[in-house]
Amino acid sequence: MLHLSRRHLLAGATAMAAGAMAPRAFAQAPAGPFKLDPLPYAPAKNEPHIDAQTMEIHHGRHHQAYVTNLNQVASQNGEVGRMPLHEMLAKLGELPESIRTAVRNNGGGHANHTMFWQIMGGSGGEPQGEVRQAIDRDLGGLQKMQDDFNAAGGRVFGSGWVFVTVDRSGKLALVSKPNQDTPLMDGQRVLMGNDVWEHAYYLKYQNRRPDYLKAWWNVVNWNVVSERYAAAKAGTLTI
Ligand code: MN3
């Protein structure tokens, strides 16, 4: 009996190893056209404010799922993936109704998280230069902007995001969205944003979303935010 169990275990392990070496076994999950970029830094880079395990699960499983689901939709609908993601999200109403919700949720999720990883991995502090001037001019200064941003994030009922949008003239505004909606769906551009889904903070902060919102500023990469601001004014910022 023991011998049999051991043989079964070995057979199972062999099959798993073979499966891992044979990607064709997973051909039902299309590889593109959408791709999950690796995190631009180690998962522990945002410690202690955002723990490494949260980063790994959030990027490798949650974001991966949005990409996988979006590719699934694309594999059945030629028009999905033929235009850039930000354009498709701005034209959701032109997509067939049967796939609109799937593209909204998974395309929004892909765009939001792609932005999110970019603007983290820094060491917080204060922004400099033009983006700082814009924060002072349009959002009442850095402290007020952070307070208002955190308050808006705290008010999101259930899952969603809080964003700072930026227009072609460089003007900033604060906006929150439910689920995986994004200002891209309104034809706007996102300077930066924070994810207030529980999966973004629950392991470390449990129900204390305000603590997470406050701590998150310690990992913002203001250099990347400044680059996004310059790109927005140049008309080259997409997601
Ligand atoms: Mn998320």
Image (cartoon, grey):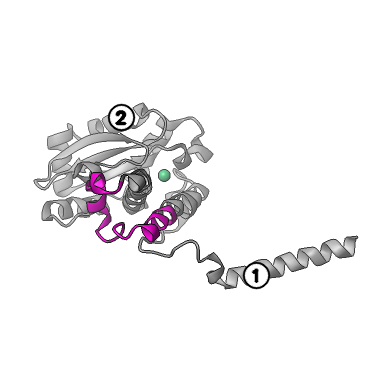
The residue drawn where x is 19% and y is 45% is 187
Evaluate whether residue 142 shows in this view.
no
At label 1, counting other C-alpha atoms closer than 10 Å, the crowd grade (few under 14, some 14-19, many 20 or more) is: few
Q: State left or right for residue 195 relative to residue 198.
A: left
Residue 173 spot, x, y in % from top left: 19, 36
Residue 17 is marked as 1
Q: Position of residue 14 (x, y in %)?
A: 70, 70
* Mark nearer the N terminus (2 vs 1): 1
Q: Residue at x 45, y 52 (%)?
A: 59
**Which image quarter: residue 100?**
top left
Q: Quadrant of ligand 1?
A: top left
Prevalent SS, magenta region: helix
Is residue 233 magenta-colored?
A: no
Where is residue 32 drawn, in percent x and y?
39, 64
- Find the magenta span and give its range: 68-96
Query: Quick check: 153 left or right of 12?
Result: left
